[in-house]
Amino acid sequence: MLITLLTLAVAAIFFMSGKVRSDLVAVCSLLVLLICHVLTPEEGLSGFSNSVVIMMVGLFVVGGAIFQTGLAKMISSRILKLAGQSELRLFLLVMLVTSAIGAFVSNTGTVALMLPIVVSMAMSAGISSGRLLMPLAFASSMGGMMTLIGTPPNLIIADTLEKAGYGSLSFFSFLPVGLVCVAVGTLVLLPLTKWFLSKKGQTDKDTRRGKSLNQLVKEYGLSSNLFRLNVDNKATIIGQTVAELGIRHKYGLNILEIRRKTTSQHRFLHTVKQFSAPDTLLEEGDVLYVSGDPGQVAQFCQACGLTLMDGHATEENAGQGATSLDFYDIGIAEIVLMGSSRIINRTVKEANFRDKFNVNVLGIRRKKEYLLRDLGNVKMHQGDVLLVQGDWKDIARLSGEEDNWVVLGQPLEEAAKVTLDYKAPVAAAIMLLMVAMMVFDFIPVAPVTAVMIAAVLMVITGCLRSVEAAYKTINWETIVLFAAMMPMSLALEKTGASEYLSTALAQRLGEYGPVVLLAGIYFTGSIMTMFISNTVTALLMAPIALQSALQIGVSPIPYLFAVTVAASMCFASPFSTPPNALVMPAGQYTFMDYVKVGLPLQVIMGIVMVIVLPLLFPF
């Protein structure tokens, strides 16, 4: 018992200091318990196979897909319309919407659903995401207090009361308590988050190298003379490659991209494909995005039997929005030619970018001059900046030629920022399927299975660019932290430390009256759940609360409600609940941030509950 308590105390000190990575502290604590034989290897590693940890991995992937498809941005824009320009109204909306969802969906699932939406809202509103993410995690736990199924401790105390002969609790027996929790949490978090979290989650935009894709499009005037040409069944170029067309040499035009819609039966596997490679075979129904002189575009259309499409509509949604370039599969970037480059004083045609790197040169910036016409015959000089276009992976490959040029910005990072908007309906359908499987009991699928199904579907339907992109959405530091700390609760329970402390406290406070005993049970549970899971806390404390109440001759109902509220309202630690851990990386929080904001809330919530519970459920 002593070894376990000392290990826990030392770990807490390191967590609060912030000088050592939290996941390393957690793993070292676990190793101490294993070396000292407090836990067996199977028990020590049980956290890494725990369903909650596996669920967290899947939820990171699902959240990443919701963000990558632009679904988060679409939903957040709707909520932002309700909030207007008011940061206060946005804060209140996040608290209310999250707690409402949390009443019916697990708090972990609620945070996974809302996290990318809230991050997107914060970016759009120009406020710190850190101001909203910790309240998001806390609100999901508060919402869980409003219904019988909201959180496991609610089910535990309902079962304890029923077995003791006090009848069964209804679905909404918890609603008054839950509403008080949400009200108190909102009022307390308003000032605390403003004082301590206003600068969390902010990124310095000036530190990012390179320009955004929209800036490049505007700077080089790519969209000013952009035309869309439809390859219908009368076109004479069907079956030819882009290279065979010779469009640049004959007409001085650039094909920026070829957009192709797949057949309807493959809708959920890929809806839009983009091509730019010279060996791309043209097919009927392709849409060519061409830049250049309008007169030359007209000549090209007439010669090849192409149809010039309306410039004020897109092929997917006619009449809604002007012609624009999208960067789903292909992208653009700038490269600066070095003095040592082998292509200095050679023409673009001689450099042969297409054959060597599978990219096109769309323009050259030479000091303050932009060269966009007849590029094939332009000789390149030292210091020229070339605007290149191609598949993102081919652009990234250019970074390997450091003797010849330097790629400005980070192409793969820019690619990651491009949302696959056409996949938003697919991501929404998968998300709703996941929520349905988690909410409705008649669907015989465990929550962790539902999350895993959703994560895999997000990958195979193309809501994430690749399996590698899915792995990158997972914050492994958070996963290791949570998985390594979970066996700590087993150690406290196994050594008898939890039961000894809770029983002794409850027995000693019983003689001072029902209110003092209620406070003792509440704060004992509140302290315990900072180090062990809320489910284990409820299992340990429920029988103690029941017996303590019966010994002094009062109703056990308020005491058992104190157990479930204390077990669920734990905010002072990032590893006490999965929601707290999930928002930690996105909000850029430290352990001390949870102490500064969560600990006062946890204490105030306890004081309010000690006053309110006897009013709602008299002794």
Image (cartoon, helix red, strand yellow):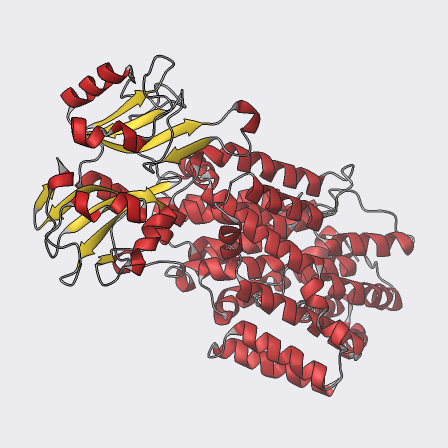
Please provide percent x and percent y for residue 500: 79, 78
Residue at coordinates 45% horizontally, 59% vertically from top-left? 587
Q: Can you say whether 85 is above or below 554 in the image?
A: above
In x, y percent, where is residue 484? 64, 71
Q: Is residue 212 above or below residue 599?
A: above
The quadrant of the image that shows the C terminus is bottom right
Residue 92 at what x, y percent from top left?
Answer: 48, 46
Q: Position of residue 473 (x, y in %)?
A: 50, 54
Q: Horizontal placement of 343 versus 114: left or right?
A: left
Question: Which residue is at a point 14% across and 39% down the rendered structure image?
Answer: 375
Near-viewer residue (532 or 543): 532
Q: Would residue 135 be found to the left or right of residue 274 on screen?
A: right
Q: Nearer the viewer, residue 33 or 578?
A: 33
Give the image quarter of residue 599: bottom right
Residue 500 appears anywhere in the view: no
Residue 27's quadrant in the figure? bottom right
- On the picture, is 412 further left or further right than 335? right
At x 36%, y 21%, the residue is: 238
Residue 503 appears left or right of 20: right
Quarter of the picture containing the N terminus is bottom right
**The quadrant where residue 310 appears:** top left
Q: Is residue 86 above or below residue 250?
A: below
